[in-house]
Image (tube, rainbow, N blue to C red):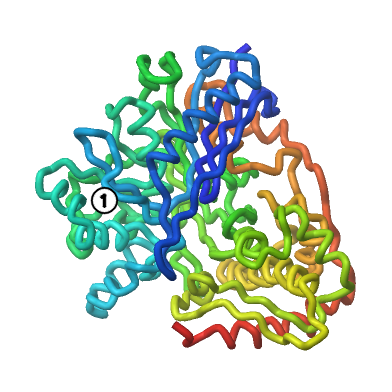
């Protein structure tokens, strides 16, 4: 028997899943890593801890499946995208903590650009000027971390998103590259040429030789280090940023197809085919995927910074639940939100607002409000933020979605998914394998080595697990939506 494995390195944890030819999971393991929060607006990860966790979950998943690394025909990687690592090429060790996509410390850097320069960046990169993306994070590291600055001067510094870091470590420091989907999230890649842009590199002060090459999303990049922990040479053949991986996992290969992934944040994408659509509705223009030598496929994306992490906040900061899964029963214990609305703009608001000055609010509180109302307002906030993004997306492409393909952890929450269907007024569709992000990375790797012959073969084996139908006349879609918009207005001009 032969299998494909995929690393899913996310914001809160690392996983390794092993799939058979039918796309079924035969082995998996997962481990959380520390969230480092040095000061308000700063979010960091220890890249060395992430690498240690990835090695552990890969070994555990192989043991759980009862196979060895030599049974893997390919490995795919999917990752939290904009999170940026700086490491030393001579020691292969991090030079500082990774700066996470949620981090806002590099906001000031954008004030240095003239209006003409700002327009150039937006046009070439397809992204708004926001600290969310990797470019300003690299600039900040070079300017504020002496070890990084010294390594840059001495030619030892390497920068990359998490996929680059893991590829470097898996190959024993032999390979430094990224794929087009991750590169499209840096503010440094030209969407038309699919290469690092000299003008953008100059504006952010990033030396080109510190960055890896840009490859497609599905090809054999390298092999795992034979002398490494796997003791095997396995092709690493697929790399996709997490949301693009979910598009592949949801089989959104054709123009007009879309999905929404519910994770730490929430991300909706629509495939625009080979057409590069420049957004006028606060969405991101990004690369959807590129399989080998085939033409690149583009996408429009709407990103919400805080969805699943809002539930974690209830657990870790407020302590009103002890596990994330408890939020559904708590929210279900009240018939409605009791007039309470929660906008979790902890790091500002992403699409379609792009307001880094926004901060989170709880509004509508009365003496009668309970932790159950706050829990329900949290689930509603996930649905309302998704509504804002989907409506902007529909306006951009000029069509109305007939259904929404959903995946990710929160799709296990029946109440949240029903609230989402009610707010949007369209059905939600969940595939049999809800964790489509890691499946997409496996598909990309498997296609590269011909484990799966074509995308048609993948389409033929898709199965639907659940559907949620919207309830007609739900107040969530009328008065609730009006109150939500008022709550959003209260978050602005705070920071």
Residue 296, compared with residue 345, is above or below; it is above
Residue 20, compared with residue 325, is above or below; it is above
Q: Determine whether, in the image, residue 220 is placed left or right of residue 207.
A: right
Quadrant into which the C terminus falls: bottom left
Nearer to me, 296 or 15: 15
| Residue position marked by numbered label 1 in the rendering | 196
Q: Is label 1 in a helix, a strand or a loop?
A: strand
Occupied quadrant, residue 118: bottom left
**How busy is the neighbourhood of tag 1: few (under 14 within 10 Å), some, or many (20 plus)?**
many
Residue at point 30% right, 43% down?
A: 94
Nearer to me, 46 or 455: 46
Nearer to me, 31 or 278: 31
Residue 96, compared with residue 73, is above or below; it is below
Measuring from the top left, give residue 344's x and y in whole percent: 60, 72
Total marks in image:
1
The reply to whether residue 399 is visible in this rendering is no
Measuring from the top left, give residue 125's x and y in whole percent: 34, 61
Residue 168, compared with residue 405, is above or below; it is above
Measuring from the top left, give residue 287's x and y in whole percent: 44, 52
Quadrant into which the N terminus falls: top right
Measuring from the top left, give residue 238's x and y in whole percent: 47, 33
The reply to whether residue 158 is visible in this rendering is yes
Residue at point 28% right, 29% down?
A: 173
Residue at point 51% right, 85% down?
A: 492
Occupied quadrant, residue 251: top right
Q: Determine whether, in the image, residue 208 is placed left or right of residue 336.
A: left
Nearer to me, 331 or 448: 331
Residue at point 10% right, 44% down?
A: 154
């Amino acid at each position: 028997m032969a299998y494909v494995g995929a690393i899913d390195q996310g914001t809160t944890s690392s996983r390794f899943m092993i799939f058979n030819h039918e796309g079924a999971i035969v082995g998996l393991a997962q481990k959380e890593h520390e969230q480092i929060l040095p000061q308000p607006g700063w979010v960091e990860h220890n890249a060395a801890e992430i690498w240690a966790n990835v090695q552990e979950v890969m070994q555990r998943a192989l043991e759980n499946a009862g196979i060895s690394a030599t049974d893997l025909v390919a490995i795919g990687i999917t990752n939290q995208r904009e999170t940026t690592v700086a490491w030393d090429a001579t020691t292969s060790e991090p030079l500082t903590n990774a700066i996470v996509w949620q981090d806002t410390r590099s906001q000031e850097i954008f004030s240095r650009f003239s209006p003409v320069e700002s327009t150039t960046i937006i046009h070439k990169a397809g992204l708004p000027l926001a600290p969310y993306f990797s470019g300003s994070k690299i600039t900040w590291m070079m300017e504020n971390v002496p070890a990084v600055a010294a390594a840059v001067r001495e030619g030892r510094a390497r920068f990359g998103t998490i996929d680059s870091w893991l590829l470097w470590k898996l190959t024993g420091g032999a390979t430094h590259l990224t794929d087009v989907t991750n590169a499209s999230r840096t503010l440094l890649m030209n969407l038309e040429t699919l290469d690092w842009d000299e003008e953008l590199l100059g504006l952010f002060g990033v030396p080109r030789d510190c960055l890896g090459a840009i490859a497609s999303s599905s090809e054999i990049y390298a092999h795992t280090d034979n002398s490494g922990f796997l003791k095997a040479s396995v092709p690493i053949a697929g790399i996709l940023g997490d949301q693009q991986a979910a598009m592949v996992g949801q089989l959104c290969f054709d123009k007009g197809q879309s999905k929404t992934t519910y994770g730490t944040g929430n991300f909706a994408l629509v495939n625009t085919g080979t057409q590069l659509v420049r957004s006028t509705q606060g969405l991101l223009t990004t690369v959807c995927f590129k399989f080998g030598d085939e033409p690149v496929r583009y996408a429009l994306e709407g990103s919400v910074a805080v969805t699943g992490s809002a539930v974690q906040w209830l657990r870790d900061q407020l302590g009103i639940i002890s596990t994330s899964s408890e939020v559904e029963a708590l929210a279900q214990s009240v018939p409605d939100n009791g007039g309470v609305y929660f906008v979790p703009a902890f790091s500002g608001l992403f699409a379609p607002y792009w307001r880094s000055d926004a901060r989170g609010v709880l509004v509508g509180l009365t003496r009668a409000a309970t932790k159950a109302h706050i829990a329900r307002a949290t689930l509603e906030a996930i649905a309302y933020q998704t509504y804002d993004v989907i409506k902007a997306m529909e306006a951009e492409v000029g069509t109305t979605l007939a259904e929404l393909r959903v995946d990710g952890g929160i799709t296990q929450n029946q109440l949240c998914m029903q609230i989402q269907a009610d707010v949007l007024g369209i059905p939600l569709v969940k595939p049999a394998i809800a964790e489509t992000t890691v499946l997409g990375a496996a598909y990309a790797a498997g296609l590269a080595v011909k484990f799966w012959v074509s995308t048609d073969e993948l389409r033929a084996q898709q199965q639907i697990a659940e559907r949620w139908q919207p309830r007609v006349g739900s107040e969530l879609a009328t008065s609730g939506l009006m109150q939500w918009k008022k709550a959003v207005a209260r978050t602005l001009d705070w920071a």
